[in-house]
Image (spheres, rainbow, N blue to C red):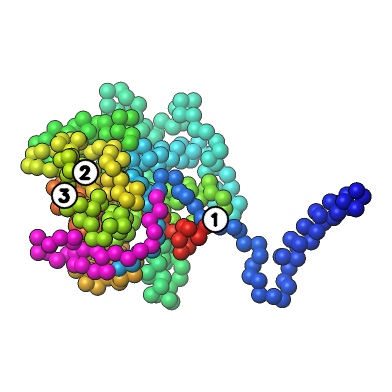
Amino acid sequence: MKKLQKLLLLLPLLAVVAVSCGRKESGQLVGVTDRPKWKGINPYGMVYVPSGTLHVGTGDEDLSRTLVARPKSISIQGFFMDDTEITNNEYRQFVQWVSDSLAHETLQHYVEDEEGDGDKQLIDWDQDVDWEDNAEELQDLYYQGNERFAGRKEIDVTKLVFEYQWYDWQRAAHDRNSNRTSHIHKEKIKVYPDTLSWIRDYAYSYNEPMTRNYFWHPAFDDYPVVGVNWKMAKAFCYWRTKVWNMYGDGVTSEDFRLPTEHEWEYAARGGREEAPYPWGAYYTRNAKGCLLANFKPGRGNYPEDGGLYTVKADGYYPNDYGLYCMAGNVAEWTETAYFENAYSFMHDLNPDIRYDAKDEDPQTYKRKVIRGGSWKDVAFFLQTGTRSWEYQDTTKCYIGFRCVLTFLGRSINDF
């Protein structure tokens, strides 16, 4: 019994010795021993798309004879992808975070940046913002005077500006004599969706109820957000990464981002080789004659598929990867710059073509690939191989987005 007690007393001491020995240099090649453990991640609302090879391009004859999607075999690294398009309520979390940050700054809710140089202060998110009790201090964030409509107290959405950053890895790789600062870009963007796009996109069409209600009314919480341009989607990804890391376990993952157009196509096919649609068939109806996506099935015929405008982000059956509405509902932004002949010169390993278009650049330089088709498009745009584009600074009531996250490792089965 006494021997057992002595042994129990020695165990903590042995543990301390073992840990201290692991941190000391032993002369052996054992690597750094105090590295954090990595067990992989499982982001909420995302599905895993494994690495693989696919044959991109049109799944049928190129009827338009444009040759902008020539067949090509490529390989794609595994990634996580949102199972639905980003919804109004999810994007509203971003808008609310921006409005709260402005309120915190107005009320001077700061803490010192302990990891910085000591001169910078950070927002103290542990403090709550009481908009009612601090109404007088926060009044500048609301519409004032003649800008108020019907006496309503509404946030001035033009003040909801978010600064995001991105790093130009391509320039850093090819300009070896430049400094790090020249590769870090900061941009400010208004984040509130352009609700007026519901009216602007159509002439002689009554869509005012959608402008007034689509983004804020709870009836549309689970519908895909629209009226966001390419840079707004990029800003959302940056913010999502920021929040993810703020509440993480200390080990950061890759950043959230927009998918490349071929990651999008690969995910849309759902593992089906050369599938013309995410569900695999050559037709937009099932055996019972029911339409399989939200689009425009006939001239002047919008509601036959069950939705006059958009529908809920999970309104139709998912593809074999578990991804909803990869065809129809809303078209989706991708990271990729649009060039008609891109397939003839892009690489076959994780193809990715980008161009940092400035505001003063010609409009042609600002084209970004959109995929999937929308509620107002005909079936051709729903095909997994169909390429289309829109200007990066343009907002439309039929374009949304979803995020991806590059998987770190060979396969999710390794963990």
Q: Position of residue 323 (x, y in %)?
A: 33, 48
Q: Callout 3 environment at 10 Å: few (<14), some (14 to 19), or many (20+)?
A: some
Which region shows up in magenta? 47-73
Q: Earlier in the sequence, mark 1 or mark 3?
A: 1
18 vs 222: above or below: below
The residue under label 3 is 283
Mark 2 residue element = loop
Q: Position of residue 219 (x, y in %)?
A: 30, 29
Give the side of residue 193 with respect to residue 125, left or right.
Answer: left
Residue type at mark 1? Lys
Residue type at mark 3? Tyr
Q: Callout 2 environment at 10 Å: few (<14), some (14 to 19), or many (20+)?
A: many
Look at discs 3 and 2 and give the one toward the viewer.
Answer: 3
Q: Residue furthest front?
A: 287
Q: Callout 1 environment at 10 Å: few (<14), some (14 to 19), or many (20+)?
A: few
The residue under label 1 is 39
* Mark drawn on residue 293: 2
**Residue sitting at x 29%, y 61%:** 262
